[in-house]
Image: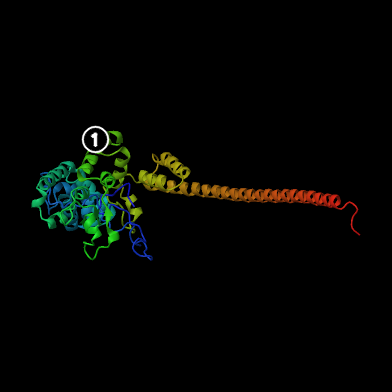
Amino acid sequence: MENIFPLQENVEIEEIYGSKRPNASPPKNSRTFGMRSGAYGFIDTETYHVRFPNWFKKGEVSPLEQNGMSEVIQAIGPEKYVQSRDCIISSYEEGNRPMTVGKAFTLVDVDMGLMLKIFSFIERWRIINYRSLIEKEMRCLKSHKTEDAKPMETTPREERSKRRGDIKKCLEESICDCGGKANFFTRSLVFRCTACLDNGNYPQEVLRSDFLPITGSLIRNMWSRKEEFLLLEGIRKFGDEWDSVSRYVQTKTKEQCVFHFLRIPILENTLSRADLAIGRLFETAENPTMCIVTFICGMVHPKVASECARVAIKHISGCSQEAVIQHILDAGKEKAREQRDLERRKIERLGSVICEALLNKIKMKIGTYKELYLSTQRVRSELVALRRGLAEDINPGGDE
């Protein structure tokens, strides 16, 4: 079964459950079979040397931080603050992606609100999330091009099996152990030609049903590392103008570019812990009133959100932040109660309409059955009359 949208991981073909044994069943803990996460699996050995401001020193609290981050330092202590800050910066230096709030939250063991203040401070001073990653990845691409330019005969077969960064190129240049062109492959990247596959020349831990054909359509639909880099660079240049992005990539359509961009994991989940105290997050926001309004607008009925926004605008200039938030919550409760009663009445009315429609449907069916019964009786009466007439014609005098 061919996948019309091949993924960028090692698995390019969808699993057909039940193809190996009758009682086969899909795995319970993952939606796909043997699949790795990530857009591609190259090893990043380059570390960025971040250019720090003159006032910043690792392991120390600068006077600027003592003034601007005094609340955080007093809450968790200078040592904990320095440890959390340096941990986020070191992870950013060693990685190849922008630092996100979700990633930073998993690195440090502090409150969410305090971590957000630390993250915002070092990001505002351009200590993290200021560099362009396209140049680094293009250098990585050029280094891989230099390695791949070596003759295939001089590269050991064991090394070729380990270099699996670009699956598309690996399939295009796949060679069987016998030296011929490979026509089949497995998810563990075991390549065999048709003759070796027919003769059973493959590892014992691999089944024949594990081999999948290498077709031209499969290779065309897959994404190479260079195409992924061109896609990201095109999005950086043209934004959401997908026609221009497709022309920049040159080998993919607009729909394929959109679909593949959605499949690339760019940012981690920002709120991954279930025990996050939302109330404390609102309290530590720079504008708690608008934070509450934004949260309500995204979570409740539009009429409730509209009422909350109206009350916030009405009281925001004449009351304190706590009083405004209380007015917003009270108005939201009242409007939500009205909306709940209205929706209940709508549900009751729709229920009565459904019952009435079902009754009318039953009445129509009963009427149809009555008409069918009457028409059947009329036909029966006509047939009885014809039979009697035919009997009289056959025996005019009648039999005693």
In the rendering, at what x and y percent does residue 29 appear? 33, 61
- Mark 1 — residue? 248
Asked whether, in this view, residue 64 is left or right of residue 1, the answer is left
Instruction: Kindly identify the residue that appears in the image at 85 percent across and 49 percent down.
Output: 393
Give the colouring mode of the picture.
rainbow
The residue drawn where x is 41% and y is 44% is 297
Q: Residue at x 61, y 49 (%)?
A: 354
Q: Secondary structure at mark 1?
A: helix
The amino acid marked with disc number 1 is: Tyr
Q: Nearer the viewer, residue 65 or 360?
A: 360
| Residue 33 figure quarter | bottom left
- Give x and y (percent) for residue 192: 21, 56
Residue 241 visible, this orientation: no
Viewer-nearest residue: 9 or 195: 195
Q: Where is residue 4? Give x, y as percent.
A: 33, 47
Q: Nearer the viewer, residue 218 or 139?
A: 218
